[in-house]
Amino acid sequence: MTSRPPPRDLRASDADRERVVKVLAEAAGDGRLTLEEHAERVQRAYHARTLGELAGLTEDLVAPSAQPLRLDGSRSVAAFFTTQRREGRWVVPDRLVVTAVGGHVVLDLREALLQGMHTIVHATLIGGQLHLLVPEGVRVVVTDAKYPGRVGADLQPSPAPANIPGSPLVEVRAFTVAGRVRVHTPRRKGSGWLGRSRRQER
């Protein structure tokens, strides 16, 4: 079985570089970087080949939760009477454990980098919620073992493009006690073909 490279060794895209350059510009604008430091880091950003090289350019500028690239590789997200979010450009492991007890977990996959074509999310929801935001063309399958809860009532998985062979699959294996799972693709401005309601795939 071929091992996957760690998140920091994955190749960077032009969009990844632009996210980092934007943070560098803001840092230069408010004095966190000198003009010389800004120029040097921008040059390094445009020459960076991996996500790790890019991430190192902003680590001392913004808090971990505000980083343009999140490469911590964490395989779990827990919300106990609070809200936890994973959004922006972050690396999604092939297996992710979600726990929400009276809390709310938001997994935004629209700009995320999936490490595999089949991602499994193990969700335990006790009076809590899991909200998945997925891009067009990603298949979502939800299976559940539940007591009173809502899994599937709010599902709007992707339309026809999701059935294309080889498209990514996100499988949610949920255990709920008065919990709730929501999956949908938000509508983008100017993109009327996005955000249409979709039936759950079983």
Image (cartoon, rainbow, N blue to C red):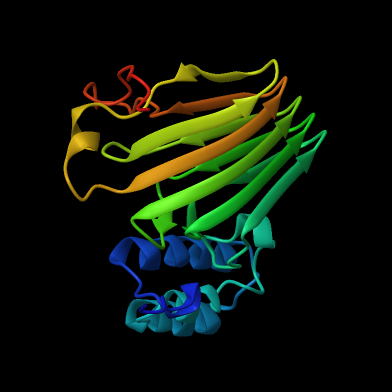
- Depth check: 104 or 98 in front? 98
- Image position of 196 with respect to 123: above or below: above
- Residue 118 in the image, given as x and y percentages of width and height: 38, 53
- Occupied quadrant, residue 161: top left
- Residue 36 in the image, given as x and y percentages of width and height: 51, 84
Residue 87 visible in the shown view: no
Q: In this view, does 4 lie to the left or right of 160?
A: right
- Image position of 163 with respect to 177: above or below: below
Q: In this view, does 32 lie to the left or right of 155?
A: right
What residue lies at 58% left-to-right and 65% top-to-bottom?
A: 27
- Depth check: 6 or 71 in front? 6
- Occupied quadrant, residue 146: top right
Q: In this view, does 164 lie to the left or right of 170?
A: left
- Occupied quadrant, residue 16: bottom left
- Depth check: 116 or 37 in front? 116
What residue lies at 68% left-to-right and 24% top-to-bottom?
A: 179
- Residue 164 in the image, given as x and y percentages of width and height: 17, 40
Q: Which quarter of the figure is the C terminus placed in?
A: top left
How many marks the image carries: the answer is: 0
Residue 145 visible in the shown view: yes
- Residue 9 in the image, given as x and y percentages of width and height: 43, 80
- Image position of 66 with respect to 165: above or below: below
- Depth check: 107 or 75 in front? 75
What residue lies at 46% left-to-right and 35% top-to-bottom?
A: 133
Q: Which quarter of the figure is the N terminus placed in?
A: bottom left
